Amino acid sequence: MADHDGVASQTVEELLESTLESVDQAEETVLRLATEMGFDEDEQHRIGMSVRECMVNAVVHGNRYNTRKKVHLTVSRTAGRLEIVVGDEGSSFDVSKLPDPLAEENLLRQSGRGLLMMQAFMDEFQVRPRQPLGTEVRMVKYLGESIKEA
Amino acid sequence: MSVKLTTRQVGDVTVVDAVGRITLGDGASTFRDTVRDLAAGGKKKLLLNLAEVSYIDSSGIGEMVSGFTTVSNQGGQVKLLNLTKRVKDLLQITKLYTVFEVFDDEASAVRSFT
């Protein structure tokens, strides 16, 4: 398939089990496309880490390892743009109500840094309720964009 | 590859040489158990050498913070040595540079313990 610029575009959809093995599978799928698009090694690392964090949230916090619930992965590539959407079937949550991991009083908390890392590593990041249930995270990385300042 | 941890004594400082990935699952739990065992065994000056750590995720970062808190609460210190650029980036993003003392030279790091 080709987009309007004549550059190859591709969408991959996977329905994944709520297991940690799915985290590896999702990372592998995304990194295959990212590599084909020409993202360099550092950018691949950031994309891969974002996918892993996102998938862990979906499996562990969203679906809570429930074998009846799935993780919905959609990866789309167009010219210079990689979009990753990860949806779970758990309870949705309000991102604005999560503790700020950068607040002085939260620096020594053991958890709560995953979303922060995804936001830092990706160019676009959005959390929204998934229909009919669950939470959906949408992340975009543009080829050639440098890492945002922390 | 999960993480492989080996320990050695330099004076009264315990250097933990880590190789591999510190991530959710084996890596993070191995790291947690090692730090807790060392603290329980009275080793309270820990220098974590992360030169050969290729990957740390938020769970691994969480275990580092947890280890820091455990040892600090027992009157000890945890410091970091030889961070790769990727791990340095993570500490910047998470503001943990303000929590951990970080060194690029082992001798200086060992001398810094009180």
Image: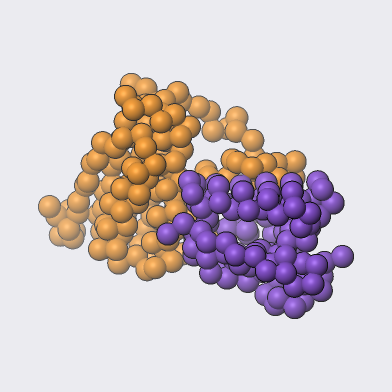
Chain colours: A orange, B purple
Q: Quadrant of the C terminus of chain B?
A: bottom right
Query: Which residue appears farthest toward the front when viewing the image?
Result: B41
Residue at (52%, 55%) from the top-left corner? B22
List x then y, in percent, for residue A120: 52, 53
x and y percentages locating residue A77 in the rendered image: 26, 53
Observer able to see residue A131: no
Residue sitting at the far right: B114
Residue B95: image quadrant is bottom right
Q: Position of residue B27 (x, y in %)?
A: 51, 52
Q: Is residue A146 visible?
A: yes
The residue under the point 70% across, 77% down is B105
In the image, residue A9 sits, relative to residue A131, either above or below, namely below
Q: In the rendered image, which quarter is residue A130 located in?
A: top left
The reply, left or right, for residue B94 in relation to residue A77 is right
In screen coordinates, is A133 left or right of B64?
left
Q: Residue furthest top?
A: A132
- Report the residue at 40% width, 48% height from top: A51
| Horizontal side of residue A116 vs A103, given as left or right | left
Residues B74 and A96: in front is B74
**Label tally:** 0
Query: Residue at 79% across / 50% down in the picture?
Result: B72
Spot occupied by residue B18 in the image (x, y as percentages of width and height)? 57, 64
